[in-house]
Amino acid sequence: MSQSSNGQVPEMPASSPGPSFDVLVVGAGFAGMYLLYRLRKLGLSARVVEAGGGVGGTWYWNRYPGARCDVESMEYSYQFSEELQQDWVWTERYAAQPEILKYAEHVAERFDLRRDIQFETRIESAMFDEARGRWRIEARTGFGDGKADTIVFDAKYFVMATGCLSSANMPAIEGIGSFAGPTYHTGQWPHDGVDFTGQKVGVIGTGSSAVQSIPIIAAEANHLTVFQRTANFAVPAHNAPLDPNVQAQIKADYRDLRERAKKNRNGIQYVPNDVSALEATADERRAEFQFRWQRGGLSFTGSFNDLLLDKNANDLAGDFVRDKIRNIVDDPEVAELLCPKSVLGCKRLCADTGYYETYNRQNVLLVDISNNPISRIVAKGIMVADRTYEVDAIVFATGFDAMTGSLLKVDIRGRSGLSLREKWREGPKTYLGLAVAGFPNFFMVTGPGSPSVLTNMLPTIEQHVEWISDLIRDAETKNVATVEATGEAEDDWCAHVNDIADETLFPTCNSWYLGANIPGKPRVFMPYIGFPQYVERCEKIAAANYAGFAFSRG
Ligand code: N01
């Protein structure tokens, strides 16, 4: 019999559960909202529970200055409703956070989703009751106003739709509590915004959130100090207002565009150049890199077919970007510090607007902490070695405990009290990134082992949600009591995810894809590489009566 992390098998609490549903979903981001829509269509009762005060998930929390999607708006949107995708009008090539949040709110209104969403309620634990074949899920409400209350939900199915980048990583730097001014995390930004006018600001981190916020903070603040541990690759986004004629053309071709996108590794519509960088001439390479740089955005990694497979090919792309940085940044020493040494695309590429140019401003200082970490935070500022950089406010752009953070915040227990935290002690194990052996009637949308963060999240979410809801429909039609991934299917899937990653350069740097940004987190490559192959595998499994899943009758 499996035991809990403290060696004891927890007992099912005696108290009778409260509200009862067919499906309890955690999270009212794009995944939770679409799942609710699908479950209603199946005639199932569902409740979505959300810690925030509104829908939108990542776009509800990430309100930092400059927050913007790095996938183009026309693609970073739902496609399940033709009317919705035809009606909605995007204003920019890459939508900013307020516009994406408005879109999420529109979807909630349009499909009348709010009546089944319970906001400001945080799920704390979920336990599978084997005797009843149902989940007992405990939540806390009222944590915002201090009048905390516990609610116990009862559900046959339990689905975590909590997103991959929703558990903020606040580094444990000594003295944080002694800082005299305000501190902010980009992933938990105040809803009323922050006015940095006249202030000295410190930004810690140089990932996507920092790359987007630094130019805007620099323009507003009196002085900005950026603390860089690892230089990151950024390519220009070339964001611009979306031409209504271009939008109309895309809408006329929407279905085909979506189908073309699904054939690409990352589920985004662009034309990858199926040529080796090593086989192209120097002129051909320069022309291709320049073409992609000029076009803007993440399709830069599609310049050649071996950039993420061969270090020598990757170095050629890296050299091109490093030359651009040296051309943009006036001070050669600062430019060298900004030149990444790592593999391009190994950490997520950033799409920027005026990032490198910001270091030409007189009020911006770049502090290299690659060899000298921040030693402590003091009342007046941030210390590196013996020097204190005085700041009035600190912005932590330090990322997330990605992919597993939000799942493991909830104490989830499957058969015999088996704890998910315990099961994943050596790293996450899933089947398809959607299910876990030992956890019946439990699913995750975009869990570790799914393509999620390496793709355009919206179509991936739609694929996961449709697949999970089809499986639930199948189970309900057959009057099944429990559906559960088998241990063998899970082992095979984990090995497959790792085998594919090992053929690429992805595991070669300390990225959050590997959990390397969180001290003590097991180093396991979490996302699945290849959206089309993933979809094909899911379809085959469904056609084979959900091979790899065990069904039980009550
Ligand atoms: O986080 P990150 P993010 N001391 O983990 C540094 C998505 N996103 O929020 O690289 C000093 O990338 C850390 O340094 P290092 C996107 O998928 C999308 O920026 O670990 N520094 C790094 O520089 C993205 O990849 C958009 O050495 C510390 C930074 O903090 C993901 O979210 C926009 C530190 C963290 O970078 C995460 O991006 C924004 C410490 N103790 C984000 N700890 C879109 O455009 C960490 N760092 C859709």
Image: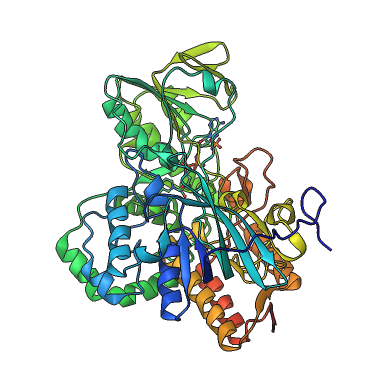
Position above or below: 553 against 436: below
Name the residue at the front extreme: 15
Residue 497 as seen in the image, left or right of residue 534: right
Residues 145 and 15: in front is 15
Looking at the rendering, in which quadrant would you find the N terminus? bottom right
- Number of numbered discs present? 0
Residue at image location 53% in from the left, 16% down from the top: 383
Name the residue at the left extreme: 245
Position above or below: 29 against 466: above
Name the residue at the bottom extreme: 478
Say whether residue 264 is visible: no
Residues 160 and 549: in front is 160
Residue 104 as seen in the image, left or right of residue 18: left
Residue at image location 77% in from the left, 54% down from the top: 4
Q: Position of residue 397 (x, y in %)?
A: 46, 35
Q: Residue 444's image quarter?
A: bottom right
Q: Residue 401's image quarter?
A: top right
Residues 352 and 505: in front is 352
Residue 126 as seen in the image, left or right of residue 165: right
Q: Position of residue 163 (x, y in %)?
A: 50, 56
Q: Where is residue 287 in the image (x, y as percent from the top left)?
A: 36, 53
Q: Where is residue 332 in the image (x, y as percent from the top left)?
A: 41, 24
* Colour scheme employed for the rendering of this structure: rainbow
Position above or below: 402 against 210: below
Say whether residue 185 is visible: yes
Looking at the rendering, in which quadrant would you find the C terminus? bottom right
Residue at image location 64% in from the left, 83% down from the top: 480
Residues 536 and 278: in front is 536
